[in-house]
Image (spheres, grey):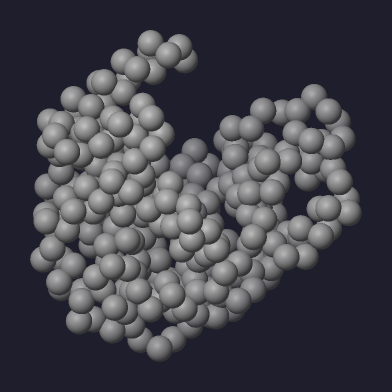
Amino acid sequence: MSKIHRLKGYIDEFFIKYRLFGYKIALHQLCFRLFKSGYKSKHKVIIKYLENHYGSLINEYKQKEQKEESLSVDCPIWICWFQGEKSMPPIVRGCFNSVKRHAGVHPVNLVTIDNYKEYVTIPQHIITKLENKEISYTHFSDIIRNNLLADYGGIWLDSTIYLTEGLKGWDKPFYTIKQNCPDDYAYVSGYRWTTFCMGGVKGNLLNSFIKDFFNAYLKKEKGMIDYFLMDYIITLGYNHIPAIKKLIDDVPYSCPDLYYMQKKMALPVNNEELDKVCRRTSIFKLNWRAEKPSDQHALYYFLKFE
């Protein structure tokens, strides 16, 4: 994409955000797009908007408490690929197979556009927004994951999660990947959680809060205030709801090499280094759009994606 086309896209986005959410939100997001800075101020105005418009829901959850229970060793694993297993590209198929290999007694459920209604009931106002392209399928998957975790409990793994061994340490009411990056402000999560790898018991407060927030938000709004809206919702819960803050604070740091395979996918395998990495990290986040490398000794082929 040329710089001119990219700039035009940013300006178009500015006017859409201005119409939907006002001048402050639009301006901060435009500055963020143009200069790749101002993370903190962008986060601040989005959080303020959501606090002002959805304070009643936040207050409703403030007094709620989380039951003392933990994820079971046979809780379901949920993975979503809307097009179905036969349409998975190589990396997604490889990730899906890795989960099935290491799932143990966890049943692995593949959620598709054809079967999601067998598990959850999504309100019609959300379906209408999806049909009208006011929300994307990416955000629709955010909604489905929180309905699944709130209604059934279990573990959500994005379709690009690659496992090298079984899931360990998930015996908590809520679990996610937390990393120690205190000075990185690019993402509002601050690496305290990941939305692409998370689990919770049935009815846990965090996923229930996110589910209810999406429902309330999409009754009122005609678009997404930010691509990472789910992270902002979790931030609201963390900042204002003591039981949710405790759920997140109780999760230990893990997976220091979460993105190792993604970065090394096209490079020759260093077996000694890979072995060392896999001893301290067993969950890896990949990118299904990664190009097939020409080097036959690349990690891509070592993991047998072809």
Residue at the extreme bottom of the image, as rendered: 68
On screen, residue 176 above or below 261: below
The percent coordinates of residue 170 (x first, y second) are: 56, 75
For the point 59% across and 32% down, which residue is it? 289
Along the line of sight, the residue nearer the viewer: 103 or 173? 173
Image quadrant assignment for residue 85: top right
Instruction: Judge from the rendering whether residue 107 lies leftward or rightward of residue 232; answer left or right.
Output: right
Along the line of sight, the residue nearer the viewer: 239 or 215? 239
Number of numbered discs visible in the structure rendering: 0
The percent coordinates of residue 183 (x first, y second) are: 48, 56
For the point 76% across and 60% down, which residue is it? 278
For the point 50% across and 74% down, which residue is it? 251
On screen, residue 150 above or below 38: below
Instruction: Judge from the rendering whether residue 287 lies leftward or rightward of residue 196; answer left or right.
Output: right
- Inspect this view and state whether residue 137 appears: no
On screen, residue 33 above or below 252: above
Quadrant the C terminus occupies: top right
Instruction: Judge from the rendering whether residue 46 lies leftward or rightward of residue 261; answer left or right.
Output: left
Image quadrant assignment for residue 200: bottom left
The percent coordinates of residue 135 (x first, y second) are: 28, 38
- Inspect this view and state whether residue 62 appears: yes
